[in-house]
């Protein structure tokens, strides 16, 4: 079996099929069946049956069957694996995808437009009624034919503009589907930056800068397909304020703050006044004095990446 046996709408765990090339589709409403922990719910007999239709060498089928029934060690005790696919090897996701490929073929046979990345699937329909009807027809096939469980809580029918897929959101502009960053993904990014720019995380200046640059570059590279210029401008402002805040915290003593402000070019009287400020860290980070002393130009000079610059360089 090869990747050529997979449907074209499947984009997970295949050569050249990355999340960047996710397909949007033309429908305005989508169905999202969610299969929880597919590898744990695979029916081994059904999987062997599907493999036997393509692989004619009985020795290979026997070897795969032994792999499925190899069992696991849990708490020092051996447990049989009568259901699912053992985790930890390259064969596990492959066998799980072979099961879901049957679902892909059924959707193609019925003429549906869909996209699947690993066990995360979207089916595109033209109306909510059509989406609900598709869901009602596909659930029995997945559960009774493939013997897979469907997570009813995460399975939904919704307008394309209200859903999240692989971290992306969607919107329609001039009758054309466009990509954006989903609000939940923005929240997760901010939480990462908060951890990196926290004073109690034990990071030094260089380590914090390297980690922050890694987060910035990696996040922009993943979401580079989205329309997000205004978002990145705001993220740059917010991130710079976080760096100013943690820097101000690091200049803990009044004397240290005074010396650093004076070294940055402030007059002695102004430097002493701000070194003795009683304003909170976050408010001070937005002050005109600290914005001038720790300017964006200075951050760029010492090697901090900018979200907008990384996005523009794509």
Image (cartoon, helix red, strand yellow):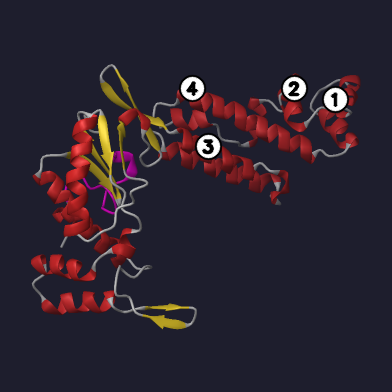
Instruction: State which tag comes first along the sequence, 4 or 3.
Output: 3
- Which callout, 4 or 3, points to the residue nearer the camera? 3
What quarter of the picture does the C terminus occupy?
top left
State the image coordinates of residue 168 (x, y, percent, origin top left).
38, 36
Do the CB atoms of the residues marked 4 and 3 lie less than 8 Å apart?
no
- Which callout, 1 or 3, points to the residue nearer the camera? 3
Instruction: State which tag comes first along the sequence, 1 or 3.
Output: 3
Name the residue carrying label 2: 287
State the image coordinates of residue 169 (x, y, percent, origin top left).
38, 32
Find residue 274 and name its label.
1
Left of 153 or right of it: where is 7?
A: left
Residue in the picture at 16% in, 58% down: 145
Residue in the picture at 29% in, 39% down: 22
Q: Please give the range of residues in magenta.
A: 7-22
Q: Nearer the viewer, residue 93 or 46?
A: 46
Residue in the picture at 43% in, 39% down: 221
Mark 1–mark 2 Cα distance, whole angstroms, equals: 10 Å
Mark 4–mark 3 Cα distance, whole angstroms, equals: 16 Å
Do the CB atoms of the residues marked 2 and 4 lie less than 8 Å apart?
no
Do the CB atoms of the residues marked 4 and 1 lie less than 8 Å apart?
no
Q: Main structural element of the magenta stretch: helix, strand or loop? A: loop
Name the residue carrying label 4: 230
Do the CB atoms of the residues marked 1 and 2 lie less than 8 Å apart?
yes
Mark 1–mark 3 Cα distance, whole angstroms, equals: 32 Å
SS type, badge 1: helix
Find residue 71 and name its label.
none
């Amino acid at each position: 079996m090869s990747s050529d046996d997979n449907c074209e709408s499947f984009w997970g765990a295949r050569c050249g099929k990355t999340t960047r090339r996710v397909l949007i589709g033309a429908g305005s409403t989508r169905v999202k069946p969610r299969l929880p922990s597919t590898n744990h719910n695979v029916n081994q007999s059904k999987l062997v049956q599907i493999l036997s239709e393509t692989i004619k060498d009985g020795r290979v089928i026997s070897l795969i069957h032994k792999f499925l029934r190899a069992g696991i060690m849990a708490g020092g005790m051996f447990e049989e694996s009568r259901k699912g696919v053992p985790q930890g090897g390259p064969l596990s996701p492959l066998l799980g995808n072979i099961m879901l490929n049957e679902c892909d073929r059924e959707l193609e046979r019925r003429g549906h437009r869909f996209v699947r990345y690993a066990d995360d699937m979207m089916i595109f329909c033209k109306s909510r009624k059509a989406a609900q009807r598709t869901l009602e027809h596909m659930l029995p096939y997945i559960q009774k034919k493939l013997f897979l469980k469907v997570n009813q809580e995460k399975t939904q029918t919704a307008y394309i503009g209200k859903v999240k897929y692989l971290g992306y959101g969607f919107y329609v502009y001039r009758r054309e589907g466009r990509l954006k960053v989903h609000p939940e993904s923005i929240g997760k990014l901010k939480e990462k930056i908060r951890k990196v720019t926290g004073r109690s995380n034990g990071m030094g200046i260089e380590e914090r800068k390297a980690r922050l640059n890694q987060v910035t570059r990696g996040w922009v590279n993943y979401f580079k397909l989205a329309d997000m210029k205004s978002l990145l401008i705001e993220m740059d402002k917010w991130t710079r304020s976080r760096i100013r805040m943690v820097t101000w915290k690091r200049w803990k003593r009044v004397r240290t703050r005074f010396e650093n402000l004076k070294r940055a070019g402030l007059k002695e009287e102004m430097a002493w006044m701000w070194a003795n400020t009683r304003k909170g860290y976050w408010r001070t980070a937005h002050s005109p004095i600290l914005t001038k002393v720790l300017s964006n130009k200075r951050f760029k000079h010492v090697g901090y990446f900018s979200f907008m610059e990384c996005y523009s360089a794509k």
